[in-house]
Image: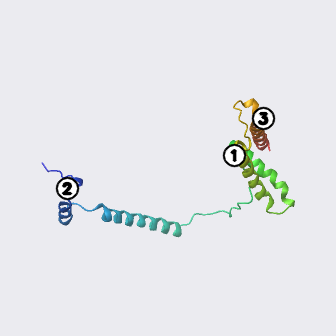
C-alpha cells in the first residue's frame, strides 16, 4: 500500500525537495504557465480557422435601417413604437428620429426616477398623493397604448 502525502501540510523544505525529485510541481508559476500556453494555443487554432475558412456572409447589415417585417417581443413594443413615432420628426434632420426617440425614452425613465424627489407629499395613502398617482397611471396607460399600437402596426 502506497503512502499518500498531503502536500498542503508539508513544511517548505519538504515541498522544495519533492519538487526537485519531480514528485510534485508548484501551482504558481508552473501550472498557471501551462494553462496559459494551452489557452493561447486554442485561441491561435480558432483564429487560424476563422481566417482560413471565413463564414459565407450576405449583404452588410445596416444598423440604422430596420426591415419592416421585424417586430420585437411584447416587452420592447412600447419603446419600438416610440422610435417609429420619432421617425415622423425627420423633417428636422436625418439625425432627429434616432436621437429624439432614444432621448425621450431616457427622459421618461429619468422622470419616473425623479417622481419621489418631486412629490414631497408626506402622506402615505395613495389617494392623497395626487402627483405620484397621476404620474404612475399616466406611465402605465402610455406604455399599454404604445404596446398595443406597436402590436397592431
- Where, quadrant-wise, is the C terminus in this rendering? top right
Residue matched to label 2: 10
Furthest residue toward left: 1
Real-space Cα separation, disc 3 to disc 1, in angstroms = 17 Å
How many neighbours does mark 1 have within 10 angstroms: few (below 14), some (14-19), or many (20 or more)? few
Of residues 15 and 72, which is closer to you in this image? 15
Q: Where is residue 115 drawn, in percent x and y?
A: 72, 43
Q: Secondary structure at mark 3?
A: helix
- Which callout, 3 or 1, points to the residue nearer the camera? 3
Furthest residue toward right: 91
Mark 3 in CB contact with mark 1 (< 8 angstroms): no
Residue matched to label 1: 113
Residue displayed at 32% across by 63% down:
28
Tell me the tag on residue 55.
Answer: none
Q: Where is residue 26 drawn, in percent x and y?
A: 27, 62
- Which callout, 1 or 2, points to the residue nearer the camera? 1
Tell me the tag on residue 130.
Answer: 3
Amino acid at each position: 500500500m502506497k503512502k499518500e502525502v498531503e502536500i498542503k501540510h508539508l513544511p517548505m523544505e519538504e515541498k522544495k525537495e519533492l519538487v526537485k525529485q519531480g514528485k510534485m510541481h508548484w501551482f504558481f508559476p508552473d501550472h498557471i504557465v501551462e494553462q496559459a500556453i494551452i489557452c493561447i494555443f486554442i485561441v491561435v487554432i480558432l483564429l487560424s480557422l476563422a481566417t482560413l475558412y471565413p463564414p459565407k456572409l450576405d449583404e452588410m447589415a445596416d444598423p440604422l435601417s430596420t426591415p419592416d417585417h421585424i417586430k420585437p417581443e411584447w416587452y420592447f413594443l412600447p419603446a419600438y413604437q416610440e422610435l417609429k413615432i420619432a421617425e415622423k420628426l425627420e423633417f428636422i434632420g436625418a439625425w432627429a428620429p434616432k436621437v429624439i426617440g432614444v432621448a425621450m425614452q431616457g427622459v421618461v425613465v429619468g422622470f419616473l426616477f425623479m417622481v419621489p424627489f418631486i412629490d414631497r407629499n408626506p402622506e402615505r395613502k395613495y389617494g392623497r398623493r395626487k402627483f405620484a398617482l397621476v404620474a404612475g397611471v399616466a406611465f402605465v396607460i402610455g406604455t399599454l397604448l404604445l404596446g398595443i399600437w406597436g402590436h397592431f402596426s
